Each structure stands twice: as C-alpha cells, then as structure tokens.
C-alpha cells in the first residue's frame, strides 16, 4: 500500500479534498529537472483538510468515478506566507514609469 503526500488545493466538494502531488522528474537525454503535478480526489469523511494543508492518503475502494483515495492524516499545517501576494511598486500601480526607466 503506497502512501502519497500532497497539498490540498480545493475543498469545494462535500467530503472531498482535491490534493496535488508534486514530483521531480529528470529528462533521460538532457538531464533537465522539471516538476510534474498530479491531482487526486481524496475522500475526507469529516472534512478536516483545509486549503494549503499537507496531507497523507492511500488507495481505497472506489467512492465515485474519480475518488479512489482516502485521507489518513494531516501531516502539516498550511503555510500562512504562501497566500500573501507580492506588493508592486507604487509607480507601477499609478501607470507611470519610474524616473530610472526613461
């Protein structure tokens, strides 16, 4: 039984969490590393997972057409700084160029 670890990206469906599992793959010829992300629909009976949480889940009986995984535990809390957007410079917000970009 394989345990997968991923990040919750959506909890809009009842008793279901959409979890993204990220893995790094190396190209066989060029040796470039890149990320592959796969999304899973995970059964969350008590709706304990929130967006941004890291969770562990395993394969189980089919609950629906796409939901064949069950949540076993929350392995970490969500990150508070990850959702904050970067503030842009005041000159860019006003639509004018800063004096250094003439």
Image (cartoon, rainbow, N blue to C red):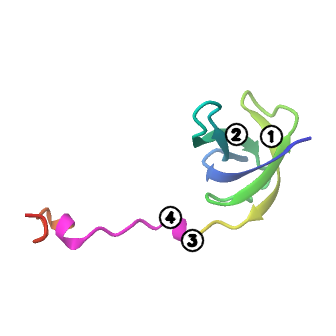
Looking at the image, is mark 3 or mark 1 earlier in the sequence? 1
Q: Quadrant of the C terminus?
A: bottom left
Magenta segment includes 99: no
Q: CA distance from mark 1 to mark 4?
A: 27 Å
Question: Is-magenta flag for residue 89?
Answer: yes
Q: What residue did someone put label 1 on?
A: 69
Question: Which tag, 1 or 2, sits closer to the chain's start?
Answer: 2
Q: Residues within 10 Å of mark 3 (few under 14, many from 20)?
A: few
Q: CA distance from mark 3 to mark 2?
A: 23 Å
Name the residue: 50% across, 64% down.
83
* Helix, strand or loop under label 4: helix
Residue 80 is marked as 3
- Confirm or deny contact between disc 3 and disc 4 (CB under 8 A): yes
Q: Which residue is mark 4?
A: 83
Q: Are marks 1 and 2 in contact (CB under 8 Å)?
A: yes
For the residues marked 3 and 4, what is the alpha-carbon distance in whole angstroms? 6 Å
User: SS at mark 2?
Assistant: strand
Along the line of sight, the residue nearer the viewer: 42 or 35: 35
Magenta residues (range)? 81-92
Q: Is residue 92 left or right of residue 19?
A: left
Q: Residue at x 74, y 43 (%)?
A: 42
The CA distance from mark 1 to mark 2 is 8 Å
Who comes first in sequence, dot 4 or dot 2? 2
Is 69 placed above or below 80 here?
above
Per the image, label 1 sits on a secondary structure element best described as strand
The percent position of residue 53, horizontal first and vertical second, equals 67, 60
Q: Position of residue 48 (x, y in %)?
A: 74, 59
């Amino acid at each position: 039984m394989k345990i997968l670890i991923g990040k919750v990206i959506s909890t809009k469906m009842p008793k279901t969490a959409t979890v993204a599992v990220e893995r790094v793959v190396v190209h066989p010829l060029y040796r470039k590393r890149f990320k592959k992300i796969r999304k899973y629909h995970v059964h969350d009976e008590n709706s304990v997972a929130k967006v941004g949480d890291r969770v562990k889940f395993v394969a189980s009986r089919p609950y629906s057409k796409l939901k064949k995984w069950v949540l076993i535990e929350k392995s970490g809390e969500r990150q508070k700084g990850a959702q904050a957007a970067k503030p842009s410079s005041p000159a860019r917000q006003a639509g004018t160029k800063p004096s250094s970009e003439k």
